[in-house]
Each structure stands twice: as C-alpha cells, then as structure tokens.
Image (tube, rainbow, N blue to C red):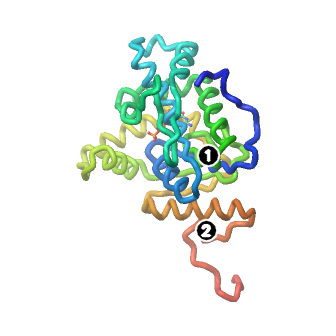
Amino acid sequence: MSPDSVDDTPGRGGHVAVAIDGPAASGKSSTAQWVAAELGFRHVDSGALYRATTAAALRSGVPPAEWTAAFLLTQAARVSLAPNETSFTPQVDGESVTEEIRRPDVTRGVPHVAQVPAVRTWVNAQVRAVARSHDVVCDGRDMGTAVFPDADLKVFLVADPWERARRRLIQRLSRGPTEEEIAEETDRLVQRDAADVTQTVQAKDAVLIDTTYLTQAEQVERIVALVRAARLRRPLTPWEGLPLVPPPADGSID
Ligand code: CDP
C-alpha cells in the first residue's frame, strides 16, 4: 500500500467506527475480533501494520540501527491487508505474515518503528481508509485519540500486568505457564508498556474496562452492549458499563 495511493480524507460516509485501545496484551485484538464478528463489522488490528512493517524491515537484512524514516516507509509500501471473513490478513510482498509478526525479534523491534511519525501517519491512513468502506472495530494504542477522535464508541482496556502476562503465555504456549515464566513475561510487558507510553493514550471520552477479573466472553458482551447503546444514541444505563445492581423495577432511585 503506497502512502500516495491511500485516500485519507476525513469522514466515514456513515460507517461506524469502534476504537479499542490499551496496553500490551490487554486482550484488545482478540476482543476486537470477537466484537466485530458479533456485530458483522470488520476488525482492523493497527498493531499488525506496525508489526508487518517491522517484519519487512527485518527481512530486508538492513541492521535496525540503520533504519531511517525513509527506509521504513519503503518497507511499509511492501505491506498490505488482505480481507478475510471478519478481519484482514497482514501481508508482506503479498505473502501472509500472520505468524512471522508474532516472532520475538519483531516484538522487540516494533516499539522503535512505531515511534517514527511518518510510519504512524502511514498506519493511520490505512486504518482510516478501511473505515471509509466498512463498519469497523479497530484496536491499538491511539485509535480513539489520533485516528478516530469522532469514533462512535471508544473503549480503553486495562488489566493487571501479571494477568496480561499469564494470558499472553497461554495463547503462545497452549499450556499453563509456570510462575517463573509469568514473572519473566511480566517484566517484558512492563518494559514494552514503558516503550509505548507516549502513544498509549486513553481518550477522555473512552469507557475504561479493567478485564483482570472478566472472562473474554464477559468483556465482549459488555462492549457489544455499549456499541448498541452508542448507536441508538441514548444515554447508557449504569449496568451496561459497570457491574452494578440494576435499579428497582418501579424506576425509583434512592
Ligand atoms: O502485542 P500487543 O497486542 O500488545 O501489541 P500490538 O497491538 O500487536 O502492537 C505492537 C506494537 O505496535 C506495540 O507495542 C506498539 O509499539 C505499536 N503500536 C502503536 O504504537 N500504535 C498502535 N495503534 C498499535 C500498535
């Protein structure tokens, strides 16, 4: 996707945009994917675009210390998103990089690539371009601030670092991790949180959801309810956003 060929004009032609942001391994992508499937929307993983650009740069053989903004933009031009059933498959040179972008060298390199303003402009343009032709659920760090300040719904997901590490390891290892493995992964996540701190921004009007004690089904259900409420443009009842006891049936509130 060449930066010149993307229509980055404002507006979404009536399409809905849901922005889900939060720190590393807070469950954004899997939740966004599920929410999109429930609503018949498309999921767009902005992190996959930063990761695919990093994977392309690593494939080039140029050492990371020599990656300039201009070089990274030429790598970004090798990246594309191929539509699949509910989301998009990230590609480099037309080849799927779904597995490759999860490699540890990509995860280590991506925060540096993501700090380059020209790369951020490019990623944001790709995400906005998709949102012009589809209802979307987009996840990342700055979807509700830099990319869709006018999103129909903004959610910011957080979870305890230990729990985030545990979930990420289960996903990666397909088994229960040891305490030692969780402790090491927690350290790595906390370091990545620090590296990503400038771009991980909770929008003032985002709904904050702490998923530490929620199952994925519960968080998906909560977000789907919030999207439906936002689309009806009615004020949220407290129990849609918070685990509160519903008010009495006669509507009286003490
Ligand atoms: O691994 P995790 O799901 O937390 O991250 P990701 O969504 O795959 O994003 C990978 C990296 O891309 C992050 O660590 C950030 O450095 C960067 N990123 C960003 O800066 N802004 C975004 N909107 C999305 C990702």
Residue at image x 63%, y 33%? 124
**Foreground residue among 108 and 12:** 12
Q: Is residue 35 above or below residue 252?
A: above
The numbered disc on residue 22 is none
**Foreground residue among 20 and 193:** 20
Q: Is residue 113 above or below residue 232?
A: above
Residue 96 image offset from top left, x and y in percent? 42, 32
From the viewer's perspective, tell me whether residue 17 is left or right of residue 244. right
Q: Disc 2 designates what residue? A: 240
Question: Quadrant of residue 64 in the image?
Answer: top left
Q: Is residue 105 above or below residue 151?
A: above
Q: Disc 1 designates what residue? A: 202
From the viewer's perspective, tell me whether residue 203 is left or right of residue 233. left
Residue at image x 69%, y 83%? 254
Question: Quadrant of residue 225 in the image?
Answer: bottom right
Residue 193 image offset from top left, x and y in percent? 47, 38
